[in-house]
Image (cartoon, rainbow, N blue to C red):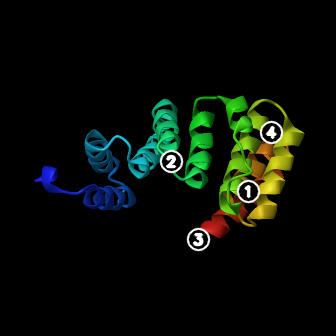
């Protein structure tokens, strides 16, 4: 019976379902946890991540902001929150997210999201700087390389864009 499972058991099952691509099963387990324990930041972070994967920015932002209130790991939350805000086209909110407390990996992802926000606002040089800074922190970051490919495409540099996309394909294989 699901009522007999602990939060840890439900989290484990939700994580397994997520990795198997069974998002609905994961959502059910996470919502069960949050019904019993609304302050479970880890469950809120995972739920926010699933909402990002589903393209549901509003739900993701809500869960991730609640995770912050419940002392969730900022290094995990802010990069996801940035992606959720991008889904909602809240570009300035992405740019305004604080970088200083994040470890390198989190900074690289957040900088890439900032680059995409700048690009969406037509600020190509700021976007380029953000993507380059992200790649200085984490060479080979596919998210940043994709951002640079998008920028190159916006600038009509289709050969460069294609080469960057090929680089991502090579990295992911």
For label 3, the SS is: loop
Q: In front: mark 2 or mark 3?
A: 2
**140 or 162, nearer to the observer:** 140
Q: How far apart are marks 4 and 2 (CA)?
A: 39 Å
Is the residue 10 above or below the residue 152 in the image? below
Can you give x and y, in whole percent of width and height, for residue 43 in the image? 38, 49
Label 1 and label 4: CA atoms lie apart by 14 Å
The disc placed on residue 145 is 1
Q: Nearer the viewer, residue 70 or 35?
A: 70
The numbered disc on residue 154 is 4
Please tell me which of labels 4 and 2 falls first in the chain: 2
* Image mark for residue 173: 3
Q: Mark 2 points at which residue?
A: 71
- Which residue is at 54% across, 53% downward? 73
Earlier sequence position, callout 4 versus callout 3: 4
Residue 162 percent location from the top left of the image? 75, 55
Q: Distance between the residues labelled 2 and 3?
A: 36 Å
* Sequence-wise first label, 2 or 1: 2
């Amino acid at each position: 019976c699901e009522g007999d499972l602990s939060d840890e058991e439900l989290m484990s099952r939700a994580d397994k379902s997520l990795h198997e691509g069974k998002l609905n099963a994961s959502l059910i387990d996470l919502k069960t946890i949050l019904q019993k324990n609304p302050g479970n930041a880890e469950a809120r972070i995972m739920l926010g991540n699933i909402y990002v994967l589903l393209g549901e920015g509003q739900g993701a932002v809500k869960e991730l902001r609640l995770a912050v209130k419940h002392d969730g790991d900022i290094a995990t939350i802010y990069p996801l929150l940035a992606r959720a805000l991008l889904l909602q086209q809240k570009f300035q909110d992405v740019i305004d997210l604080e970088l200083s407390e994040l470890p390198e990996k989190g900074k690289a992802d957040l900088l890439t999201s900032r680059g995409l926000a700048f690009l969406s606002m037509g600020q190509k040089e700021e976007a380029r700087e953000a993507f380059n800074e992200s790649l200085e922190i984490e060479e080979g970051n596919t998210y940043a390389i994709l951002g640079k490919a998008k920028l190159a495409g916006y600038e009509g540099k289709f050969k460069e864009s294609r080469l960057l996309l090929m680089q991502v394909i090579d990295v992911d294989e």
